[in-house]
C-alpha cells in the first residue's frame, strides 16, 4: 500500500517580491528622479518661464515628497504596501501630465504636490518596505538587487524621455509613460506586493519558521516617539546620508555640462552612462560582500571614502585631462548606488525591527529635503568658483564629512 507523499511547499516568494520592487524602482527613479531635469527643459521651452522658476518647482517636488515619505509607515499601516504603491503609480502619472499641461506657474507648483506624493510612495523608503519583510540574513543582497532598478531607470528613461517628448510632445509623452507606470505598478501591487510572508506561511529568507531574533542577532531596545531623534546612531545616520546624497546629486547635476567642454557631447554622454553602470556594479558588489556579521557602518565609510578619492581624481584632472576625468567618474560612480541602499541596511543592524521602517522613512525624508537644494547650491558654487575645481573639492569635503558622521555613530548611544 503506497503512502501519500507530503505536499511540496511553494517556492520562496521573497525573490519574486524583490524583482517586483526592482521594476517599481525603474519607473520611480526613471519618472520622478531622472524625469524632472528633463521636465525643466521641456517646461522652459514650452512656456518661456525663467529657469529659476521651473527649478524652484523641481525643488518643491522633492520637498513635498520628503514630507509625504516621513509619513509613509503610517500610510502603509493603514492601506498596505501594495495599495500605497498602486496609488503612487497613479499619482506619478497624473503629476507628470499636470506638469505638461500647466499654463500658469501656480498650476506647475500644484502639480509638484501630486508628483512629489507619487515619488514618496514609490521611492527609496517604499522599496525597503516592500523587500524587508521577506529577508533578514540576505536583506543586503535583496535590497541591492531591488535598488539596482533605480540605476536601470536612469539608463532607460533619460534618453527615452527626450525621444518621446520630441516625437509626441511633453503632454503625449507624460500621458503614455504615466499610463504605463500606473498599469504596471497596479498589476504588481495586486499580484505580488500585497502578499505577505504570513499569508504564505513563509519565514524570512525562506528559512524554517523560528524566532526572528535568533536569526538576526540584533537586540536593540525600541525607540518610540522622540527617543529616536535623541539617539546617536539615528542622528549620525541622518547626517551622513544627507551629506552623501547632497554631494552626489549636486555634482551629478552639473557633471555632464562640465564634461562637454573637454570631451564633446558624445563622449560626455558616454561618461555619464559609465557612472550609472559603475553604480550598478558597486551596489551589486556591496550586496554580495555584506554578509551577516559585517559592520555596515564600515561599509558606508568605505563607500564615502571611495567617492572622496574619485572627487580628488576629478580635481587632479583640472577639468581637462580625459583619462583622469574618466578614472574619477569610475571611482565616484562605484559609490553612487549605495547611498540609497546603505541606510536601509544600517537601519536593520542598528535598530529594533519595530523601528526599522520608521528609521528608513525618516532618514529618506531628511536626505531628500537636503538634496533638493544641492543642484542650486552647486550651481552657485560653480558661478563663483573658477572652473570645475570648486565643485570637485566640495564633493570631496562633503563626502569626507559624511564618513566622519557615520563613524561617530559606531559608538553606542547613551
Image: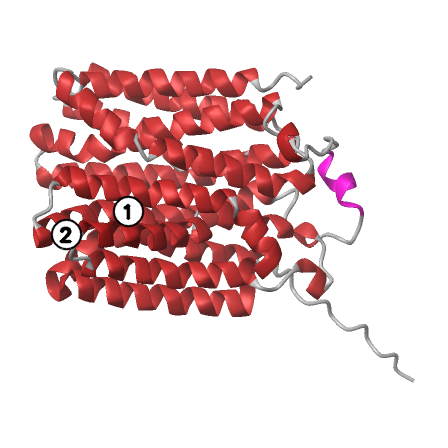
The percent coordinates of residue 36 (x first, y second) are 25, 47
Taking the spot 34% from the left edge, 15% from the top edge, the residue there is: 397
Q: What mark, if any, has residue 325 been given in the picture?
A: none
The percent coordinates of residue 285 (x first, y second) are 47, 37
Q: Label 2: which residue?
A: 42
Comparing labels 2 and 1, the label whose residue is closer to the camera: 2
Check if residue 213 falls in the magenta segment: yes
Give the quadrant of the N terminus. bottom right
The percent coordinates of residue 302 (x first, y second) are 47, 22
Give the quadrant of the C terminus. top right
- Residues 44 and 172: in front is 44
Tag 2 secondary structure? helix
Check if residue 346 falls in the magenta segment: no
Question: Along the horizontal axis of the image, is 251 left or right of 192?
Answer: left
Q: Are marks 2 and 1 in contact (CB under 8 Å)?
A: no
Q: Residues within 10 Å of mark 2 (few under 14, many from 20)?
A: many
Dot placed on the residue nearer the N-terminal end, 2 or 1: 1
Taking the spot 73% from the left edge, 70% from the top edge, the residue there is: 8
Taking the spot 63% from the left edge, 16% from the top edge, the residue there is: 411
Residue 316 to residue 40: above or below: above
**Residue bounds of the magenta highlight:** 211-217
Taking the spot 21% from the left edge, 14% from the top edge, the residue there is: 316
How many badges with numbers are in the image?
A: 2
Tag 1 secondary structure? loop
The percent coordinates of residue 314 (x first, y second) are 23, 21
Residue 165 visible in the shown view: yes
Q: Label 1: which residue?
A: 34
- Residues 186 and 255: in front is 186
Q: Residues within 10 Å of mark 1 (few under 14, many from 20)?
A: many
Residue 406 to residue 255: above or below: above
Q: Residue furthest right?
A: 1
Amino acid at each position: 500500500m503506497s503512502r501519500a507523499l507530503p505536499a511540496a511547499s511553494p517556492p520562496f516568494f521573497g525573490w519574486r517580491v524583490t524583482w517586483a520592487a526592482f521594476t517599481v524602482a525603474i519607473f520611480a527613479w526613471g519618472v520622478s528622479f531622472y524625469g524632472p531635469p528633463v521636465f525643466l527643459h521641456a517646461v522652459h521651452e514650452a512656456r518661456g518661464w525663467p529657469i529659476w522658476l521651473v527649478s524652484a518647482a523641481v525643488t518643491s517636488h522633492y520637498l513635498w515628497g520628503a514630507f509625504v515619505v516621513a509619513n509613509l509607515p503610517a500610510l502603509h499601516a493603514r492601506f498596505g504596501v501594495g495599495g500605497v504603491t498602486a496609488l503612487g503609480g497613479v499619482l506619478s502619472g497624473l503629476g507628470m501630465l499636470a506638469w505638461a499641461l500647466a499654463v500658469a506657474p501656480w498650476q506647475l507648483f500644484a502639480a509638484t504636490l501630486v508628483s512629489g506624493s507619487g515619488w514618496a510612495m514609490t521611492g527609496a523608503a517604499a522599496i525597503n518596505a516592500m523587500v524587508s519583510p521577506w529577508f533578514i540574513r540576505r536583506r543586503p543582497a535583496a535590497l541591492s538587487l531591488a535598488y539596482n532598478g533605480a540605476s536601470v531607470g536612469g539608463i532607460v528613461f533619460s534618453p527615452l524621455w527626450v525621444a518621446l517628448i520630441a516625437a509626441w510632445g511633453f503632454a503625449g509623452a507624460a500621458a503614455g509613460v504615466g499610463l504605463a507606470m500606473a498599469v504596471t505598478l497596479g498589476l504588481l501591487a495586486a499580484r505580488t506586493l500585497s502578499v505577505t510572508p504570513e499569508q504564505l506561511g513563509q519565514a524570512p529568507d525562506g528559512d524554517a519558521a523560528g524566532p526572528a531574533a535568533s536569526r538576526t542577532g540584533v537586540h536593540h531596545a525600541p525607540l518610540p516617539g522622540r527617543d529616536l531623534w535623541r539617539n546617536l546612531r539615528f542622528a549620525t545616520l541622518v547626517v551622513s546620508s544627507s551629506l552623501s546624497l547632497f554631494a552626489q546629486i549636486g555634482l551629478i547635476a552639473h557633471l555632464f555640462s562640465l564634461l562637454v567642454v573637454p570631451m564633446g557631447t558624445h563622449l560626455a554622454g558616454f561618461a555619464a552612462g559609465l557612472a550609472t553602470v559603475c553604480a550598478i556594479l558597486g551596489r551589486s558588489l556591496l550586496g554580495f560582500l555584506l554578509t551577516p556579521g559585517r559592520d555596515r557602518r564600515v561599509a558606508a565609510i568605505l563607500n564615502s571614502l571611495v567617492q572622496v578619492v574619485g572627487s580628488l581624481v576629478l580635481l587632479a584632472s583640472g577639468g581637462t585631462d580625459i583619462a583622469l576625468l574618466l578614472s574619477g567618474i569610475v571611482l565616484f560612480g562605484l559609490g553612487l548606488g549605495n547611498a540609497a541602499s546603505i541606510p536601509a541596511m544600517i537601519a536593520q543592524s542598528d535598530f529594533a525591527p519595530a523601528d526599522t521602517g520608521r528609521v528608513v522613512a525618516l532618514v529618506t525624508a531628511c536626505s531628500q529635503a537636503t538634496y533638493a537644494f544641492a543642484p542650486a547650491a552647486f550651481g552657485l558654487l560653480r558661478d563663483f568658483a573658477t572652473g570645475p575645481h570648486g565643485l570637485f573639492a566640495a564633493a570631496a569635503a562633503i563626502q569626507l564629512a559624511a564618513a566622519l558622521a557615520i563613524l561617530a555613530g559606531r559608538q553606542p548611544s547613551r
